[in-house]
Amino acid sequence: MTPNSNYGRVYNFSAGPAVLPVPVLEQVRDELLCLPGVGSSVLEISHRSKAFDQILDQTLADLRTLLQIPEGYSIAFLQGGSRLQFSMIPMNLLRGTDKTAEYIVTGTWGKSALAEAKKEGATKVLWDGKEGNYSSLPNIDELGSSADAAYVHLTSNETIQGVQFAGDPALAAPVVCDCSSDFLSRPVDVSKYGLIYACAQKNAGPAGVTAVIIRDDLLARGSDDLPGYLLYRNHVDGKSCYNTPPTFAIYVMGLVIKWLINDIGGLDKMAAANQAKAGLLYSLIDQYPTVFQGHAEKGVRSMMNVTFRLPSDELQAEFLAAAKAANCTDLKGHRSVGGIRASIYNAMPTAGVETLASVMRDFAAKHA
Ligand SMILES: *Cc1c(COP(=O)(O)O)cnc(C)c1O
């Protein structure tokens, strides 16, 4: 294996846990036995040690820089995935109030988030895309959201259906956004949100850590009667060390954030690269509509998860085999939707998308 080889790596289109930047994996490898200047592996040191505290502080500071998180917002790194956030959000922001939480349901994840909120208090569905099989998105301004709502919940990118909101909503009530599958893929105006959350394993790191960015006034909500782990302010007050945090996952996420800042050059550049990658695949879907049937409507297509079907199960199997022969793996759509899903997160190289595009072109030439 030469230093320039790709280590036998395939083009992995998994929806998550998903591809990570090679330079990050290389640094993890190089430092795994001994963190420079520390004398132990990051896996072996206390979360209260000076060495980990530095990693944590640097990661918090770099995330603030990268996402331009304004004053008045706090960050917590939690466990339990985005799914625990489906419960923690209504536990902290809805339970015990006389308010209603509003949900915009644009796919599988939004539906699951709503189901958990119903256990905690009053909910209202502002919009549900079920009738269109979650292939479209609403105009958020026109949904009649109440300024008095406990919060409005939306999913910026529905990972399974492949529909993504283009910009940041402007609503009077606090907007709570599940950004799990497009976190750090593009700039976000954090000031438009009350709370943003994202599990790391789609686009920001390994499984095991979930980032929560919360507006400080919302930390006052949530009763001390809640189990201690489930109260946001305990995590913010304890700088994500209320209990032992997922130290290794935070360390790797910190390296991914550094990679975005130093190697990529920030989120504008990352977004442009993501647009270009997605454009390659969508243009083939548009060029060969009888072979590739895109799931999402044109205006709401995801830059992260490209979803489409082939005309028959046989052709789908043939397509997956052709992709596999070209080293493109993990393209089978989610079991609930079927078809093909190409997840092309930040760390998917352009060469991987170009390879998949050439598989699609060859396949279309044969079957159109
Ligand atoms: C993957 C995903 C989740 C679930 O994340 P877990 O970490 O498995 O709990 C929630 N929302 C979205 C949008 C996702 O992509």
Image: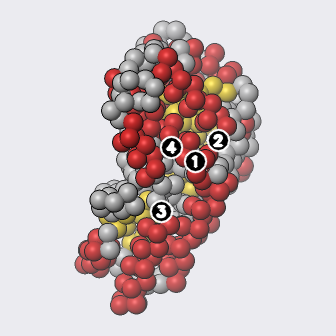
Q: Label 2, on which residue?
A: 66
Q: Label 1, on which residue?
A: 260
Frontmost residue, 272 versus 213: 272
- First in sequence: mark 1 vs mark 3: 1
Quarter occupied by residue 249: top left
Q: Visible in this render: residue 328?
A: yes
How far apart marks 2 and 1 lie (CA) works out to: 8 Å
Q: Is mark 3 on a helix, strand or loop?
A: loop
Q: Which amino acid does label 3 sit on?
A: Pro
How far apart marks 2 and 3 lie (CA) works out to: 21 Å
**304, above or below 26, in the image:** below
Which color mode does the image show? secondary structure
Q: What element carries label 4?
A: helix
- First in sequence: mark 3 vs mark 4: 4
How far apart marks 1 and 4 lie (CA) works out to: 6 Å
In the image, is 215 to the left or to the right of 301?
right
Q: Label 4, on which residue?
A: 256
Q: What residue type is labelled 2?
A: Leu
**CB of mark 2 near ligand 1 (< 8 Å):** no
